[in-house]
Structures are given as C-alpha cells and as structure tokens.
Image: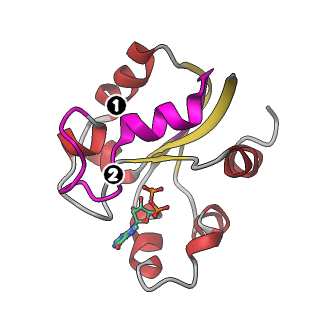
Amino acid sequence: MTQRTLVLLKPDAVRRGLVGNVLARFEAKGLRIVAMEHRHIDAATADAHYAEHVERDFYPPLRDFVTSGPLVALVLEGDEAIEVVRALNGATDGRKAAPGTIRGDLSLSNRENLVHGSDSPESAEREIGLWFPGI
Ligand code: IDP
C-alpha cells in the first residue's frame, strides 16, 4: 500500500554534512521525495512535533538539540513507506542500531541519531499536517 511518512534529518545530520548520504539511502531504496524544506524550528514547533514526549525526562535536552540548528524536513512516499523508513533508520540508540541502518552506520548516540520517521499512519498524518500543511 502506498504511504507517505514525515522524515526529519535532524540538526546533527546537517552539521555533520550527512544530508546527502542519508537522502541517497532513501532514494536508492525507491522512496520518492514529495516535499522537502530546510528549517530552523523554535521550541513551540519542537513541542508540537514531539507532543507525546514533552513530559519525559529526556525531552528538555531533546528539545534543545532539535532547535540547535537547521534541519531538513521531508515527506517520503512509497509502498509501506512508514515501516520501510523506520527499518532504514534503525533502532533509536545509534550504539545499538544494526550495521547497515542509517543510525547503525552513522550515529553513536541515543539522542543525536540523525533521523526521525513517523511511527504509524496516524502519526504520519498528524506530522505531515504539522510540517507541510499544504500538501
Ligand atoms: P524514534 O525516533 O526511534 O521513534 P522515540 O522513542 O520516538 O524514538 O524518541 C524520539 C527521539 O527522542 C529519539 O529519536 C531520540 O532523538 C530521543 N530519545 C529517545 N529516547 C532517548 C533517551 O533515552 N535519551 C536521549 N534521547 C532519547
């Protein structure tokens, strides 16, 4: 089933010059970029995006991180795109993520783990509406 999913290339990806590397993996897999924007978000946007995490202990440093510099937000489309992107991203903690995944190959951190991908069709709809209300 064709799906759309919201992906963020977080500020560490931009700072480390890994945007091209990560985008190439999604494109090589066959996913299509249907929207993309370079943005530096404020705390209110971070809170809206991570609404389910705002009360968690790990959230204040996560908010500082995602607002620390520009990121690249995009919408990817393809067959089973939500699950496929999550598999390409790898486990949340870069130290534990499998080699071959984005986080497993390129991140050594639980927080600075380069990418976000929507975790369900409901999240994808909500997040795409938040980041790209026009599409
Ligand atoms: P996900 O991005 O793999 O879906 P979530 O559990 O939704 O993981 O967490 C959102 C983001 O919060 C993670 O990608 C990571 O940047 C950060 N995060 C999650 N758990 C921790 C933690 O235990 N310590 C620090 N940061 C965390």
- For marks 1 and 2, give the CA distance: 15 Å
Counting the numbered discs, the total is 2
Which residue is the site of mark 1? 22
Residue at (29% x, 27% y) in the render: 21
Residue 54 location, x and y as percent? Answer: 58, 78
Q: Residues within 10 Å of mark 2 (few under 14, many from 20)?
A: some
Residue found 39% across the figure and 77% down from its top: 61
Q: Secondary structure at mark 1?
A: helix
The amino acid pointed to by label 1 is Val
Amino acid at pointer 2 = Ala
- The reply, left or right, for residue 81 in relation to residue 102 is right
- State yes or no: residue 94 in magenta: yes
Residue 106 vertical placement versus 75 (above, below) = below
Residue beneath disc 2: 91
Choose the circle earlier in sequence order: 1 or 2. 1
Looking at the rendering, the stretch of residues picked out in magenta corresponds to 73-100
Above or below, 86 against 35 in this view is below
Whether the residue carrying mark 2 lies under 8 Å from ligand 1 is answered with yes
Residue 73 at x, y percent in the picture: 55, 41
